[in-house]
Image: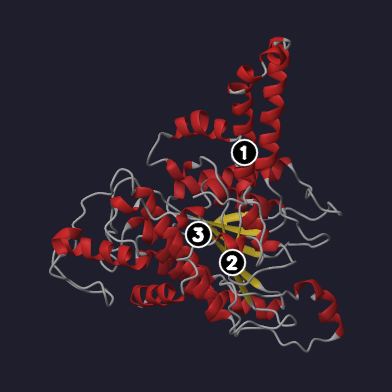
Amino acid sequence: MLHLHSNEVSAMVILLLLLFTLIVTPSVFPLFWQARSWLDILLYILCFLVISRLTARGSRCLWPPNVDFTGRVALVVGASSGVGFEVAAQLAMQGWTVILAGRHRGRLLRAQTRINHQLARHPATAGRSKPDFPRGRTFLLDAVDFLDKESVRRFASSILSIQDRYPLALLVNAAGVLRRHLHYSSNKDWWDLEEMLATNAVGPMLLTKLLLPALIQTAERSRLSSRVVNVASSCHTFLGFKKLRLRDDPIDMICDLKRNARLLNLSGVPTQQNVPEGCLASSDDSHYVMHDFPLLNFIGYYGLSKLCVIWNTRLLAESLSGLTFDTSLNANEAKALRKQTEKVISLAPGESKGVPSQRQRSKVYVACVHPGISATHLYRDLLPSWFLDYCVYLPSLIVGKTLDELAQSTLKAAVEEENIVQGGYYMCDGEHGSNNGVNCLSKHATDAAAIKAYAKFLDPLLQS
């Protein structure tokens, strides 16, 4: 589940080198160590830990200089904690108007209070060549539950109702859950949809689809590209241990989850509603009854949901490939938008169909990111929050990222002007392009047949 090119892996190598030096070399070079004092050894260890921490940090978002983001509106879903909170806070610090969204209104209110305190403490915009731009602001609308189809539609309607006053320019889908135990949606429309799949992939895809008209409208009015950023994960490369799962193919795993809901009779009345081709009942259904995730394989189903996030990004990129600005710009437009002219590549290496030329700019760019490795409250279903904060999060900083550092790849995809990748995958250190993040995708993530099958599974779930 680790990207070999990531900063965290480099930090782990440094830490392993330290352990190797402390464990092995005393027996090989005893005289060297006998001549060292305890203070020397302590300083030696401290130097390695500092180098490891600095290596794990990764690169930071390069905010466009002399750009006033005041008036730009962003919707950050999952803003109550973790990556979503940090992204919302840093966007507001740079002048954005940020709409905070999430499942629990109480958590969102606490997050808003924390962000407002940060804005009050730092009235000047940091990290700009001209630190005189005003701070942004945050506000809340209704809570949104990605397990409930109607909740998603109501929330989208509330966003569209304020489009004239708050034109949406950026959508960040950072909501996510990790569940140790098997749960299904209680919604009548999605009763056979597993919770991680619904919250991490299907719900955000429905919201994005409903808000695309607003993003396109904002781009056409401002002549600046809108963006959608989906928070994925390196876990998409791990679908569980093969010996402990029934199927190797991710589409089969999705079908098994839907079939399992019917076998458990969760709807009260057995039905085949919304079951795509290939997921219908069979004579060996008894082999697929699963009352809970296997202890060692629940992470695999989380990885499955994040794989679907990458597929969402690919499908969105393909659907938006034809929506570009006219290339005939007047002199003023060309000067103002010269850095917005971006080279676009496809998600799958070697595929060029439908890719706009370098002079064309998409009205809506979409990308997915892997934030990095850290012990966020994503794991609160596994461990108590206090244990995560003090016993896991702090020690993990030696080879992992702080919450601030986790947000950088998302911010890069959201605001950086150079080398934006349409449908691309940003690594946790913010690298992107055909020679970096795209190479870190699993074979399933770029499987055209699997993406097509997933689209067939997804289509009825997104219908009215």
Which label lies toward us, 2 or 3? 2
C-alpha span from label 2 to label 1 = 29 Å
Residue lying at 13% horizontally and 67% vertically, measured from the top left: 269
Quarter in which the C terminus is drawn:
bottom left
Residue 143, horizontal then vertical, whole percent: 44, 57
Secondary structure beneath label 1: helix
Q: Is residue 165 left or right of residue 332?
A: left
Compared with 411, 339 (above or below) is below
Q: Residue furthest front?
A: 28
Residue 221, horizontal then vertical, whole percent: 68, 79
Residue under label 3, please give it: 141
Residue in front for this viewpoint, 459 or 121: 459
Residue type at numbered disc 2: Ala
Residue under label 1, please give it: 13
* Residue 111 figure quarter: top right
Compared with 347, 238 (above or below) is above
Tell me which label, 1 or 3, sits earlier in the chain.
Answer: 1
Residue in front for this viewpoint, 305 or 325: 305
Residue 191 visible in image: no
